[in-house]
Amino acid sequence: MDFRTAGRPLVVLLTVLLLPATAGAQPRPTAPSPDWPCVQVFVPNLSAATLWPGPPIDQYLKAWPDHPELAPLASRATSRSISDDEATEAIDRFADSLTDNKDETLTLLFSGIFEEADRARDRTITGIQRFSRTQQEMLSKLSEAVAQLDAARAATPPDDQRVRDLSEQVAWQRRILEERNRSLSALCEQPGIVEGRLGRLAREIASRKESQ
């Protein structure tokens, strides 16, 4: 390989590497900040009203921590270590065990699940934004290496060893960025996965209420 001429498509590559995840499938909505790299619309906070067919839960969000027996179930139902079916089954077993104040208790339970899910989703979004910032920094370093490589190729007399070293550096940085960019699609799906489970659990809990 001639390192003085290799890697000419890098200018195109640098543009492609930071296209939003799954950008080929649909145009990217306007993002609220450069830290959001996903095609999915950025929604900073969940709204219980869009998911929960029951009464407003503002007061229940304040009250549910006073019922420590609900915490383990709320945590388990939102855990990624169990399936949607397992989460639903845990809800059903709890609902079947209730005899008094069933509707009130189920609304408190949903409030706890909502809060746990919102926290988990917030952590995921923070991780995506941190990933994006690191990606931007790595791309900047790759751009600098490409500029140095172009300058080394244009030098007179040419420094073949420097061209070779820089070409290897650029190839290594490029591979890392490509691997990270491939993992971004899966990361971007995580907030939606949390929302999807929360919606299913909301419907299941509501269906077990006596006043549905």
Image: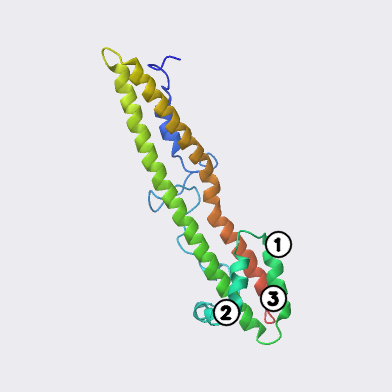
Identity, as a three-letter code, of the amino acid under mark 1: Asp
In the rendered view, would you say 152 is above or below 191? above
Q: Is residue 54 above or below residue 21?
A: below
Label 1 neighbour load within 10 Å: few <14, some 14-19, many 20+:
few
The answer to which of marks 2 and 1 sits earlier in the sequence is 2
Going by the picture, which residue comes out furthest to the left? Answer: 156
Judged left or right of residue 104, residue 41 is left
Check disc 2 and report the residue beneath it.
68
- The quarter of the picture where the C terminus appears is bottom right
Looking at the picture, the colour scheme in use is rainbow
N-terminal-most mark, 2 or 3: 2
Residue 199: x and y in percent read 61, 65
User: Would residue 178 appear left or right of 87 to someone viewing this image?
Assistant: left
**Amino acid marked by disc 2:** Pro
Q: Position of residue 210 (x, y in %)?
A: 70, 81
Q: Which quadrant of the structure image shows residue 211?
A: bottom right
In the drawing, does residue 5 fall left or right of residue 148? right
Disc 3 target residue? 94
Kindly identify the residue that appears in the image at 35 percent across and 36 percent down: 141
Residue marked by disc 1:
85
Q: Which secondary structure, mark 2?
A: helix
Q: Earlier in the sequence, mark 1 or mark 3?
A: 1
71 relative to 7, above or below: below
Instruction: Examine the rendering and report whether any part of residue 111 can be seen.
Output: yes
- Provide residue 165's location: percent of width, then percent of height: 37, 23
Neighbor class of circle 2 (other Cα within 10 Å; few <14, some 14-19, many 20+) is: few
Instruction: Give the secondary structure at mark 3.
Output: helix
Measured Cα–Cα span from mark 1 to mark 3: 14 Å
The number of numbered badges drawn on the structure is 3
Q: CA distance from mark 2 to mark 1?
A: 24 Å
How many C-alpha atoms fall within 10 Å of the one at disc 3: few (<14), some, or many (≥20)? some
